[in-house]
Image (cartoon, rainbow, N blue to C red):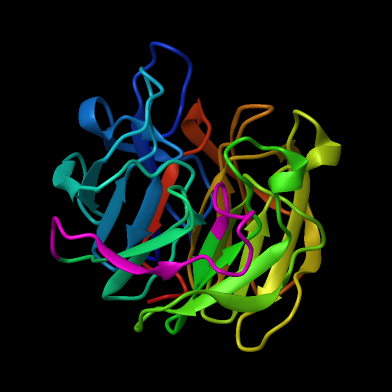
Amino acid sequence: TGGTRGLKIAGYTAPGSNVDIDYFNIATTGNATKWGDADGDAAQYAAFSISDRTRGVFGGGNDTSGHSGEVKTNFITIASEGAVTDFGDLSAAVVGAAKGLNGNSTRGLISGGNGNTIEYITIQTTGNFNNFGNLAVSTNGVDNVAGFCNSVKSFQAGGTHASGASSGSTDAIGYVHTATLGNSAHFGDLSAARWHICGASNSVRGILWNGMNPSSGATGMNIIEYLELSSLGDAVDFGDTSHATRSRGAAASPTRSVAFGGADPTINTMDYVQFSTKGDAIDFGDLTQIVEAPSMASNGHGGL
């Protein structure tokens, strides 16, 4: 196949700038290439994203010009370039849903961003969003949570209320069984309460990138943590990133996790780590533009 393809989808850029969709081959390093435009109905940030081996679905979030919550959703075909197609509308705006990919080869989950609701879709159909259950581990972690998955489970880590108040944050990591319906159960904890984090995983490990907490003030953090997905347990230190930032996107192949973009400070940097080892992130290349809170897709993440 030439390696797993990762995509950076939309996000927030400088006011008045066009918003790109970028792609890159996770097996190699180098700068991302423009896939197409995410202007108009696809110009969203802090949106949910879901992908299987052929299709990436994204939506909700805030409109990049009006900064208002959106119900519109779209999909793209990962292997092609340029066309963004309408998927359907959410019943209510979802802003700050799980950053990362929750789902398997059939079903994708939208976790948080609209209270503690979890919804699901069948990725290869359009238009139907169905109730899955609730984020029941912590009622404080319903926005800006990290999402990641293997083929059996979908995980949600950290998060806060939309207010960002320290009293409304959590270090809890929850999980659900993707193929069934129900509320989340407790898996373990992060090293500290953190939000605006992003997740990516293969079938064995989940990587949790950056984020922020009360002690970091208005700036992001450079922390990377990981989980072994086969058993319950707390997150463990993996290494550091070159930039302290938050609100990144991330994509995964069976061997690598790549994180990109970010805010406070806003960057176009791409970093990667190898799942099988621990250590600091390595420079991958650059996105085509500086961006924060993008959506993401890959055709080789841990849920597939």
Q: Residue furthest right?
A: 215
Q: Residue at x 68, y 85 (%)?
A: 232
Magenta-tinted stretch: 125-146
Quick check: 118 above or below 161?
A: below
Quick check: 271 above or below 255?
A: above
Q: Position of residue 188 (x, y in %)?
A: 71, 75
> Which quadrant of the structure image shows residue 136?
bottom right
Q: Residue at x 72, y 51 (%)?
A: 194
Is 145 contained in the magenta span? yes
Quick check: 128 above or below 115?
A: below
Left or right of 57? Residue 227 is right
Q: Nearer the viewer, residue 79 or 123?
A: 123
> Which quadrant of the structure image shows residue 34?
top left
> Which quadrant of the structure image shows residue 263?
top right
Q: Position of residue 73 (x, y in %)?
A: 24, 45
Q: Nearer the viewer, residue 85 or 3?
A: 85
Q: Residue at x 36, y 32 (%)?
A: 69
Q: Quadrant of the C terminus?
A: bottom left
Residue 241 visible in image: no
Q: Quadrant of the N terminus?
A: bottom left
Q: Residue at x 44, y 84 (%)?
A: 152
Left or right of 209? Residue 136 is left
Quick check: 253 above or below 289?
A: below
Majority secondary structure of the magenta segment?
loop
Residue 170 visible in image: yes
Is 180 contained in the magenta span? no
Q: Position of residue 203 (x, y in %)?
A: 51, 80
